[in-house]
Amino acid sequence: MSQIRNEAVGLQAGALALLTSVLWGGNPVAIKMGLDGVPPAAMAGLRFALGALTVWVGALFAGIPLRVPASEWKGLGGLALLFALQIWLLNAGTGYTTASRSGVVINVYPFFTALFAHLLVGDRLGLGKWLGFAFSFAGVLLLFWESVSFGETGYLLGDVMVAASGLLLGLRQVVIKRLVQGLNPYQVLFWQAMLSLPLFAAWSVFFEAEAEYVFSGAVIAGVLYQGIVVAGLCFIVLVFLLRHHSPSRLGVFSFITPIVGVLLSAWLLGDALSPYLLASVALVVVGIVVANQVERAQGQGA
């Protein structure tokens, strides 16, 4: 395997990471809109069919062949299984909670990314990351407490499913980090999506056969945003960044994602901005920023 690269995040890479974080803030809103007409697994299939098409077009224009060596299929197959479970948990979990809560809870993933990076790629987990864990998990626990205290068991189930998706997303970032050392990012993204499509299709056939489909303008817009913007363009940019930079260093830019998600949820879906929700957003953002600022200060003082 090629040596794993962890270059410093410069201005251009930082700007791209920030842009993807902003666009990702709209993903829970798009999921919630799509779920009004399409069940979770079927929506994931539609999303990543569009994503695979977007990646294929990008690879075509870039002149990147999508054929991969036989030795890489085992890693790509494992990634597809992890990917399918993570996305299904996110979609189904968002259906049981609000878009704004989902947008906050999923953003525990930078800390799981840091933990798995520490264990799997030698990216040290220092004091700053532990402080960040404390703040951000306090924010997520605050949402869980709100669910329990007000008897909103549906919210609690959805929040737990989205948190599990965040854990798997953190692991997936590190798995991709390892895979793109030997493969082109376009290849990883294309086969991640293509290998997961039969899984989403089978799940939908067996468990969503009775679901009704309603393709309103809002539902179509939600699916297109998830497929082209997030699963296509954002994934391409992120995986190229992961090829050169540390997953945990890129995590600092995700501080904007829950803020964007909560604001868009309130604006487009009418989600209530409860004190619990606002406090949770603040704690998650503080956790992400503290983790990265402390680590950066320690790196400069070394």
Image (spheres, grey):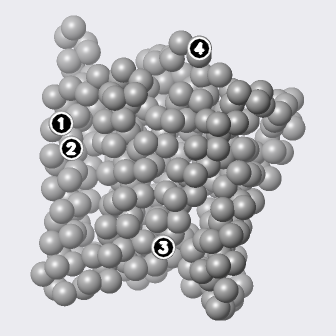
Q: Secondary structure at mark 2?
A: helix
Q: Position of residue 193 (x, y in %)?
A: 69, 51
Residue visible at 15% across and 56% down? Answer: 138
Does 74 sit left or right of 175 as displayed? right
Q: What is the number of the mark on residue 18?
A: none
The three-letter code of the residue at mark 2 reads: Phe
Q: Position of residue 130 (x, y in %)?
A: 18, 36
Alpha carbons under labels 3 and 2: distance apart: 25 Å
Quarter of image, res 220? bottom right
Dot 4 alpha-carbon crowd within 10 angstroms: few under 14, some 14 to 19, many 20 or more: few
- Mark closest to the chain's N terminus, 1 or 3: 3
- Mark closest to the chain's N terminus, 3 or 2: 3
Alpha carbons under labels 4 and 3: distance apart: 37 Å
Q: Secondary structure at mark 1?
A: helix
Quarter of the image with the N terminus is: top right
Residue at numbered disc 2 = 133
Alpha carbons under labels 2 and 4: distance apart: 31 Å
Q: Position of residue 241 (x, y in %)?
A: 55, 30
Q: What is the number of the mark on residue 92?
A: 3
Residue at numbered disc 4 = 2
Dot 3 alpha-carbon crowd within 10 angstroms: few under 14, some 14 to 19, many 20 or more: many
Q: Nearer the viewer, residue 90 or 220?
A: 90
Alpha carbons under labels 1 and 3: distance apart: 30 Å
Quarter of image, res 150? bottom left
The label nearer to you, 2 versus 4, is: 4
The three-letter code of the residue at mark 4 reads: Ser
- Mark closest to the chain's N terminus, 2 or 4: 4
